[in-house]
Image (spheres, helix red, strand yellow):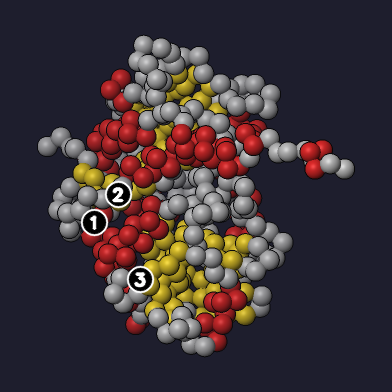
């Protein structure tokens, strides 16, 4: 058969091309006077509650079976024909959706997670919210939800925080935080398998228990041999709801066996990727004697580009570059086992908004436990502690840094 008879791939539909399209999508219509309307924070309206709730004690709120949210939420609806309607801050409460809504059938949902911190200097801050908003656009594009200018989303988040932050994170209780969950869902009530022509953005602010210091460190269990969290060409790099539901069974199994999270391995060589929904780091001595901080790379789009991960790498390159090699590359569980056998493991931690920087003390793999050194009396080890302190100091205003974004509050 002549080579020309071999069917050629439709290049427009390759994953690489779809990624190029995602990256170059306009976030605003090209001319100002045509529909659909862009997401516009200057159109925000306020419908404030007449019955503000009593702010619960933190321990009580975190012990509840239901996530406790603040008094208000922000919503903005979108249609393909009209674009974005004016966003609204209104009392927190249930959503109304048709049972045929796209999100309920085809997982047209993506979300973000960031925190708002009450600083020791009395100010209210978020940490690099621009990174979360840019990532939300990337996630939305991956699942055909509407695009928006990430700077407008950031303004909306800050506006909601200005309303609920002062009362729910009082100045006399520095060192506390709340969790912010921007969410985008396809709402079109049409069962056709297609990109939704209606959607809703909403932002809520919630309590979240402190997860960064489990007694004795975080214990990981490697993923089952026949299960993967994400795959090349998939959507592991996007914060879409569809990534999480299918991971819950493995996590429940691991919990029953006394472990906290799954260390997700990938491929026949067992590449280490992520720990639960956090990025994963190891500090070890390489075979050539150099000390190294290592984490999985982003290039094959298997793992999430965590804001915490990125901040740790940037900070470590700046401040630890003389004592450590900082490396993003593929590495396997066998390399970790070998380093353990040769006494080269120094420390390990998981990093993400929810768990912040959480020391890892054990990895269970195929019947064996790898133990990883912690600091004295179960504190995080040296490098983990330094990183945790540096980033925590920015979040809580102990140092002033461009990553800490102050929320305006009425005095
Ligand atoms: C959210 C998330 C992270 C952490 O990202 P941050 O921006 O640091 O909070 C890591 N991995 C997965 C799978 C996640 O969903």
Residue sitting at the far front: 2
Pick the residue in front: 62 or 245: 245
In the rendered structure, the answer to whether residue 379 lies left or right of residue 23 reads left
136 vs 175, nearest the viewer: 136
Q: Secondary structure at mark 1?
A: helix
Name the quadrant containing residue 206.
top left
Quarter occupied by the C terminus: top left
- In the rendered image, residue 367, in percent from the top left (x then y), is placed at 66, 78
Cα separation, mark 1 vs mark 3, equals 16 Å
Residue that lies at the very extreme toward the right in this rendered image = 1
Q: Earlier in the sequence, mark 3 or mark 2?
A: 2
Q: Which residue is mark 2?
A: 127
Cα gap from disc 2 to disc 1, whole angstroms: 8 Å
Q: Secondary structure at mark 3?
A: helix
User: Mark 2 falls on what kind of element?
Assistant: strand
In the picture provided, is 105 more to the left or to the right than 355? right
The residue at which mark 3 appears reads as 384
Marking on residue 13: none
Where is residue 399 shown, x and y percent of the image?
Answer: 17, 58
Q: Within 10 angstroms of label 1, few (less than 14), some, or many (20 or more) residues?
A: many
The residue that mark 1 highlights is 394
353 relative to 159 in the view: left or right: right
Residue, far left: 411
At 18% from the left edge and 37% from the top edge, which residue is drawn? 409
Confirm whether residue 41 shows in the render.
yes
Residue 188: x percent and y percent?
Answer: 58, 22
């Amino acid at each position: 058969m002549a080579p020309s008879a071999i069917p050629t791939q439709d290049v427009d539909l390759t994953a690489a091309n779809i990624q190029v399209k995602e990256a170059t999508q306009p976030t605003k219509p090209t001319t100002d006077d045509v529909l659909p309307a862009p997401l516009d924070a200057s159109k925000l309206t306020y419908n404030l509650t007449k019955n503000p709730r009593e702010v619960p004690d933190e321990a009580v709120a975190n012990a509840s079976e239901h996530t406790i949210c603040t008094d208000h939420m922000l919503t903005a609806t979108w249609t393909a024909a009209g674009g974005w309607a004016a966003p609204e801050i209104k009392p927190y409460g249930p959503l109304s959706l048709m049972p045929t809504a796209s999100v309920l059938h085809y997982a047209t949902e993506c979300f973000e997670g960031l925190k708002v911190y009450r600083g020791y200097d009395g100010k209210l801050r978020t940490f690099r919210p621009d990174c979360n908003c840019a990532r939300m656009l990337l996630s939305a594009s991956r699942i055909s939800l509407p695009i928006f200018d990430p700077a407008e989303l950031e303004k909306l988040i800050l506006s909601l925080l200005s309303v609920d932050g002062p009362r729910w994170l009082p100045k006399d209780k520095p060192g506390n935080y709340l969790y912010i969950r921007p969410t985008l869902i396809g709402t079109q009530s049409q069962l056709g398998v297609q990109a939704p022509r209606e959607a809703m953005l909403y932002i809520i602010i919630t309590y979240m228990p402190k997860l960064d210091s489990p007694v004795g460190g975080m214990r990981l269990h490697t993923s089952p041999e026949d299960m993967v969290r994400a795959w090349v060409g998939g959507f592991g790099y996007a914060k879409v709801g569809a990534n999480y539901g299918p991971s819950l069974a493995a996590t429940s199994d691991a919990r029953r066996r006394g472990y906290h999270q799954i260390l997700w391995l990938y491929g026949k060589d067992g590449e280490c990727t992520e720990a639960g929904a956090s990025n994963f780091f190891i500090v070890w001595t390489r075979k050539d004697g150099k000390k190294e901080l290592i984490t999985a790379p982003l290039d094959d789009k298997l793992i999430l580009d965590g804001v915490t991960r990125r901040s740790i790498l940037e900070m470590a390159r700046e401040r630890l570059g003389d004592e450590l090699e900082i490396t993003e590359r593929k590495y396997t569980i066998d390399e970790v086992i070998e380093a353990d056998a040769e006494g080269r493991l120094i420390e390990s931690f998981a990093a993400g908004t929810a768990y912040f920087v959480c020391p890892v003390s054990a990895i269970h793999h195929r019947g064996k436990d790898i133990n990883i050194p912690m600091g004295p009396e179960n504190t995080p080890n040296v490098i983990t502690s330094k990183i945790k302190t540096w980033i925590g100091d920015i979040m809580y205003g102990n140092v002033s840094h461009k990553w800490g974004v102050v929320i305006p509050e009425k005095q």
